[in-house]
Image (tube, rainbow, N blue to C red):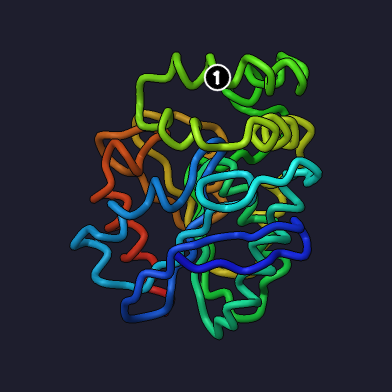
Amino acid sequence: MESFFSSIANCRVRWLDLPGSGTPLVFVHGLGCASSYEYPRVVADKNFAGRRAILIDLPGYGYSEKPKDFSYSITEQAAVVAELISHLSLKKFFLYGHSMGGSICIEASQRLAEGLCALIVSEPNFHPGGGFFSKQICSYTEDNYVARIHTSLVADETGPWAGSLSVAAPWAVWRGADSLITGSNWFEIFAHLKIPKNLIFGESSLPDSDFTKVQTLKITTTVLPDCGHSMSWENPSALSDALDAFCKMHE
């Protein structure tokens, strides 16, 4: 596992750089997750065709450090992603983000015009207001969530999310959720980015009004079978195939 010191987050950020051929794909995870936990199965799939993959654990998550004085806002996390990519001196790369990570990648794309071949997002937060878990988390104060609610949320979670959530910093989770709720109009930013883009949804998450609207804008859309929001766990092979196929179109 690689690491560098982020001057933005004032902590060490860690990532997996899995060797392969072709233009690398950078992965950014969602709320309470970690790329090192969620995506090894995706990139190991035969459908990924041995492409180089960079799996980032954002500050506050996974193996990265978890300072208490960082904002963990979408904008600041996007700045860290851009900082890391600059550190890697990647001449060409693809960027993929899921859920909160999709919103982060949309903002990071504004900072990464040079070298960014294409942006892929799956079920991102497109609008302020947050999703189910963000609203649930921020129904408590940060102090209350950190002191007792986070532990009970982990205990009540029966799916794979429990593993990454258990090692996420509670203050990072709460502040990330709060930033999704206060939010930006990520849909408008996404729509106006002048790069190839792909919006991925699991079929169980449809119908969705944003997905339909993106289709009318003639932006590439992909529907994955036999999965919903947790597509990397529910159907990793389909996600792997969709990612590699789109990257091959824009090498």
The residue at 33%/65% (across/down) is 244
The residue at 53%/42% (across/down) is 30
**Which quadrant of the figure has residue 240?**
bottom left
**Which quadrant of the figure has residue 224?**
top left
Q: Which residue is mark 1?
A: 151
Say whether residue 165 is left or right of residue 6.
Answer: left
The residue at 76%/41% (across/down) is 68
Does residue 218 lie above or below 223 as drawn? below
All told, the count of numbered labels is 1
Say whether residue 201 is left or right of residue 168.
Answer: left
**Residue 215 visible within the image:** no
Q: Nearer the viewer, residue 12 or 131?
A: 12
Does residue 9 lie above or below 232 as drawn? below
Q: Quadrant of the N terminus?
A: bottom left
Does residue 123 lie above or below 209 as drawn? below
Determine whether the residue tagged by mark 1 lies in a helix, strand or loop: helix
Q: Position of residue 183 (x, y in %)?
A: 76, 38
**Which quadrant of the figure has residue 235?**
top left
